Image (spheres, rainbow, N blue to C red):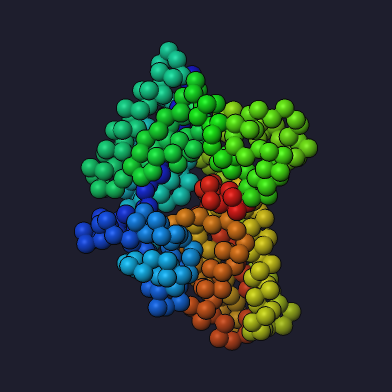
Amino acid sequence: MFRVIFHLDMDAFYASVEQRDDPHLRGKPVIVGSPPTQRGVVCAASYEARKFGVRSALPSATAGRLCPKGIFVRPRMDHYREESRRIMAIVAQTGAVVELMSIDEAYLDMSNNCQAETLDDSLQMAVLLGQALRQRIWTERRLTATIGIASNKLLAKIASDHQKPNGLTVITDEEKVRFLRPLPVRTLYGVGKVTERVLNGVGISTVGDLQDYTGDLRALVGSFGPKLKQFAFGEDDRALEIGDEVKSISGEETFLQDTDDRKILRNCLKEQASDIGKRLKHRQLAAHTVQVKVRYSDFLTLTRQISVEEPIAEAGEIYRLACFLLAKEKLVHRPLRLLGLGVSNLREPTTRQLALF
């Protein structure tokens, strides 16, 4: 039985929903988040705004400077979640096995629907199904989606990143090695900033360089070496995760004495963010949602969270969003007994997050 995997990625999801709902926003640089005159961050940006360097988790003031004509829209998370539910209901009707990665992204195992005499013939059958799925999402929800199709998760994800927005790309087994050769080595799943620097140091800057490398990669990247070599040739045996995946990562600290000392609280958050960042790196994950938790001397406990469209994994970004939440919600108005930090709505990192790793 041949394996056929789709990677479905909704295009600039939050901003696209806003542009769909308000025709005056179409074709304009839409920034979902707090206005630049207020303390806040960017939750999402349309492709028109991304051309100016605006991205998720940027301070709104910075986004305003980068894109002076940007139109800021308050996020409507409940609305986006409901829209996601409707889209995934359409996806479910394909009969695929689905691994939901985030509110706007999923892997689909379409193997049962695409069986032919050869794998490449199966992939060509998948093209028709992919086109039909994209068309149905557009017809029923008026939103565009990009789909990558291949024989495994690694290639399907790379394929979906190849033609955005509103694209469909197939990487066949026959062409996968050639397709990967010119791509930056950081494109491969698991290659982060440190690994990329190590590889660049020995002249490996593209996947083709990695394919041609005759040395022992374990001397460069440790036990990841054999798997990295497989990825370079487009081989990936990871199964879809549909049950026991990690839902969240968090940490908290109970102070010996209640405190509202900003330096102590900042250091606490930095340590927690650093630990969470390392755990995300270890699991090769990034997070859409950051949450802070506070408990006062009377044991009153409050939690507040913020979600961004592009997932984050760097400790600095997690820390900055946590500080923003504490300040915005005025949570440190009296001494704290406990301070906690967590991330959820986890998914695989994009190329940008892999570079941060």
Q: Specify the farthest residue to the left.
A: 23
Is residue 3 visible in the rendered image? The answer is no
Q: Specify the farthest residue to the front.
A: 203
Q: Position of residue 229 (x, y in %)?
A: 66, 31
Give the residue displayed 29% in from the left and 48% down from the top: 143
Give the residue displayed 37% in from the left and 32% down from the top: 95
* Image quadrant where residue 35 sits: bottom left
Above-or-below relation of 327 to 3: below
How many marks overall? 0
Above-or-below relation of 134 to 267: above
Is residue 83 visible in the rendered image? The answer is yes
Give the residue displayed 63% in from the left and 47% down from the top: 192
Q: Specify the farthest residue to the right.
A: 219
Above-or-below relation of 125 to 343: above
Q: Is residue 90 left or right of residue 116?
A: left
Give the residue displayed 30% in from the left and 56% down from the top: 17
Q: Nearer the viewer, residue 96 or 131?
A: 131
Q: Is residue 296 left or right of residue 89?
A: right
Q: Position of residue 289 (x, y in %)?
A: 50, 60
* Image quadrant where residue 203 sits: top right
Q: Specify the farthest residue to the top.
A: 117
Q: Is residue 277 left or right of residue 63?
A: right
Q: Position of residue 90 (x, y in %)?
A: 32, 41
Q: Position of residue 344 (x, y in %)?
A: 53, 57
